[in-house]
Amino acid sequence: MTSEPTSVIIVGVGGQGIILASRVLSVAALKSGYRVKVSETHGMAQRGGSVITHLRYGSSVYSPLISAGQADYLIGFEKLEAVRCLPLIKEDGLLIINDQEIPPLPVLLGSFPYPELTRDSLRGSAPRLQFVPARACAQQLGEPRAVNMVLLGCLARHLQIARECWQMAIDECVRPQYQELDRQAFSTGLNLVAGG
């Protein structure tokens, strides 16, 4: 068991399943014997506003909050929201970013353009970068809302949490009618990472 806590930021917009993703990660870490601390911040709107979760786990954890330059992993459910949180990632941290754009209100109103955020433009923004077509993967499974489990699968490849702990966490946190779908989405994410 690691002595230094592992620090994970999960960020996106309301309605993307970020809270469920953080709950599944928390339960999986607990089932692995780690102590877990979580802090969630919701934007002004339940759907469409910024959502950020700070999650830390390890043999001992005293605070859930992750300071600038301290996140081991930053999981971006939406590109612009991920870029806003880049200052939180460590020098050797990993950015896993969903290739999805959800324009915020100022962009929708025409006040600002949505910035060009491609794999090439983001290369160098984070120490390690994995660009993930999570929405396309979820749509192939027939459920676009399964993006959260695809991204969790990508993250799981890098964490010292056993596969059976993830399975138990999905079963505990997800409604029964969605469990099989979410297990498939999680496996898709694992395979994406395995493929590079």
Image: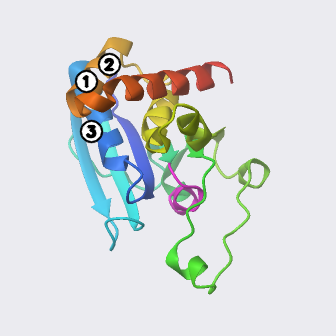
Q: Position of residue 113 (x, y in %)?
A: 68, 77
Q: Which residues are magenta?
A: 77-85
Q: Amino acid at mark 1?
A: Asp
Residue occupying the point 36% across, 19% down: 161
Q: Can I make out residue 141 in this image?
A: yes
Q: Which residue is mark 1?
A: 171
Q: Does residue 19 lie above or below 106 as drawn?
A: above
Q: Secondary structure at mark 3?
A: helix
Label 2 neighbourhood size at 10 Å, few (<14), some (14-19), many (20+)? some
Q: Are marks 3 and 1 in contact (CB under 8 Å)?
A: no
User: The disc labelled 3 sits on which kind of residue?
Assistant: Arg
Location of the N terminus (image quadrant): top left
User: Is 13 displayed left or right of 29 in the figure?
Assistant: right
Q: Which mark is residue 34?
A: none
**Residue at label 3?**
23
Say few, some or many: other residues with alpha carbon within 10 Å of mark 1 (under 14 / 14 to 19 / 20 or more): some
Q: Is residue 68 above or below residue 27?
A: below
Question: Disc 3 and disc 1: Cα gap in Å?
Answer: 12 Å
Dot 3 or dot 1: first in sequence order is: 3
Q: Amino acid at mark 2?
A: Gln
Question: In the image, is residue 23 above or below residue 187?
Answer: below
Q: Mainly helix, strand or loop, the magenta region?
A: helix
- Marks 2 and 1 in Cβ contact (< 8 Å): yes
Q: Nearer the viewer, residue 90 or 38?
A: 38
- Measured as percent of width and height from the top left, residue 142 is found at 51, 35
Image spot of residue 168 (x, y percent)? 26, 19
- Mark 2 lies on residue: 167
